[in-house]
Image (spheres, rainbow, N blue to C red):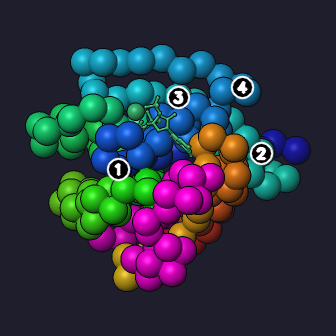
Amino acid sequence: MVKTQFNWKIVILGDGSVGKTSLVTWYTKRTFDNFYQPTLGAQFSVKELDLTSDTRVKLFLWDIAGQVKFSAIRKMFYERAHAALFVYDVTQPTTFESIDTWKDDLVDSLGEDFPAALIANKIDLDSRRAISTEEGFEKATSLEMPYYETSAKTGEGVDDAFLNLCLLLHDKQIQSD
Ligand code: G3D
Ligand code: MG
């Protein structure tokens, strides 16, 4: 049987040090290449997976890097993206507060109705946790996104977050066909 193939660009957003690169690395490193593009201010990785028995997906994961202050560069980063992951660090409240700004910035470029998920990362650092599951879940609900908790260190929740985002995208894609 011929499989349906989708190529999806997913942008990973959030403040510096929340674990964007670590999440992408954990998710992809068993199978792929990472290469660094410092001039773009982004790291770019690829992962292929069989999403359903008849659907193969190639993910292009764009992980925003450094202080990407120039909106022209961010716009280029967002261009033709299919979905977004918003990441914060559960031990750093400022990174949680920044999520709204990241969301607004993406909406400016790509509009409201955009498949996305909220990721609470570094849940392994339990004793230093400053943002609870309830607060994270509430934020996700207010932004109309699903909520996932991850640790890029232990790998907990990482596959699940990416897989569920893909399934969300897949449903949208099927609906729009
Ligand atoms: P960024 O790409 O969002 O800027 P990085 O973030 O992936 O570079 O991660 C920033 C720092 O946080 C790194 O530590 C990384 O190892 C750590 N980190 C990322 N995810 C997790 C996690 O889930 N748990 C823990 N405990 N640490 C994590 P360094 O020390 O290299 O700065
Ligand atoms: Mg990074």
Of label 2 and label 1, which has the lower sequence position? 1
| Residue at 32%, 56% in the rendered image | 95
Of label 1 and label 4, which has the lower sequence position? 1
For label 1, being within 8 Å of ligand 1 is answered yes
| Identity, as a three-letter code, of the amino acid under mark 3 | Ser
- Tag of residue 31: 4
Whether residue 45 is visible, yes or no, is yes
Q: Mark 1 points at which residue?
A: 14
Of label 3 and label 2, which has the lower sequence position? 3
Q: Name the residue under label 2.
A: 50
SS under mark 2: strand
Give the label, 4 or 2, closer to the camera.
4
| Identity, as a three-letter code, of the amino acid under mark 4 | Thr
| Residue at 81%, 42% in the rendered image | 2
Q: Distance between the residues labelled 3 and 4?
A: 10 Å
Q: How far apart are marks 4 and 2 (CA)?
A: 14 Å
- Specify the segment rendered in magenta: 110-139
Question: Where is residue 172 drawn, in percent x and y?
Answer: 54, 67
Question: Where is residue 162 drawn, in percent x and y?
Answer: 62, 52
The image shows residue 30, relative to residue 33, as above or below, that is below
| Identity, as a three-letter code, of the amino acid under mark 1 | Gly
Local crowd at mark 3 within 10 Å, few (<14), some, or many (≥20)?
Answer: many
Give the label, 3 or 2, closer to the camera.
3
Of label 3 and label 4, which has the lower sequence position? 4
> 116 or 92, which is in the foreground?
92
Local crowd at mark 1 within 10 Å, few (<14), some, or many (≥20)?
Answer: many
